[in-house]
Structures are given as C-alpha cells and as structure tokens.
Amino acid sequence: MLNYSSIGDDILEVSVEFAKGVLFVRFYGFLSKDNTKQIKNILIDILNKGGIKYLVFNLNNCKYNKNIDIFKDCNKIIKKNKGLMFLCGIDEEIFKNYRYVNNEINALRKINTCFN
C-alpha cells in the first residue's frame, strides 16, 4: 500500500492499494488539478510499468472540482492495457465519460462479470 499526502492550499491524502488484480486509489480531502500532479505521475508510472488492467478511483471521502485530468490520463493507459476503469463516489453528471459504480465491491463485481 502506498500512502501519499499533498500539503498546500488544499490537503489531499491518497491511499493506493493493489488487491485481487485491481489497483484501488482512494482520495481523502480536496481533489484539484493542482494537487494531483505528483500523484498522477506516480500512478501513470505504476500503470505503465505494471501493465495494470483494472483501476478503481474512490472519491467517497473527498470533495473535487470537475477540471481534473488525472482520470482522463489514467483511463487512456487502462484502455491501452485492454482493461477497465471505474469511479465511485462521484457526481455522474460531472464525469459522464467514465464508468460509475456505487462502491468498490460493485466495481469488482463488474470486472469479474466482464472478464471472467
């Protein structure tokens, strides 16, 4: 498990865990374009080097603005790896272009349904 904290104008804590073939990224605090730059670079490196196919972002414990490019960049890599990316804990209207699930368990169910 990788834990990351961004201290600045907006505090963001990130927990990254790989379990059951899925990379889970959990955000706590305020998620903005500015405070995700470093974690985005770390995640992109993990996704590329690890060949990760399944990614779940959990935003249940954070607030966010809609101008976040971390999802778009990670989704490109996941698609290249022939996998799936899910967002949970979001406003579906803001992030229309992504797969939404209520929680991490439902993401695992969908992954298992699609690929097993």
Image: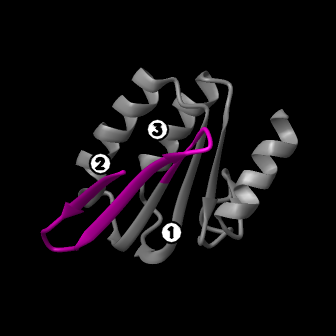
Q: Which residue is mark 2?
A: 39
Secondary structure category for the residue under label 3: helix
Q: Earlier in the sequence, mark 2 or mark 3?
A: 2
Instruction: Give the alpha-carbon distance from disc 1 to disc 2, as whole Å.
Output: 15 Å
Which residue occupies 67% across, 32% down?
83
Direction from residue 70 to residue 21 in the image, left or right: right
Say if the magenta span includes residue 16: yes
Residue at left 76%, top 44%? 111
Residue 46 x/y as whole percent: 39, 32
Amino acid at circle 2: Ile
* Residue at image point 61% right, 32% down: 53
Label number found at residue 73: 3
Q: Secondary structure at mark 1?
A: strand
Q: Nearer the viewer, mark 1 or mark 3?
A: 1
- Quickly name the residue at label 1: 59
Quarter of the picture containing the C terminus is top right
Q: Amino acid at mark 1?
A: Leu
Q: In the image, residue 103 lies at what x, y percent? A: 67, 68
Q: Position of residue 34 (x, y in %)?
A: 25, 58
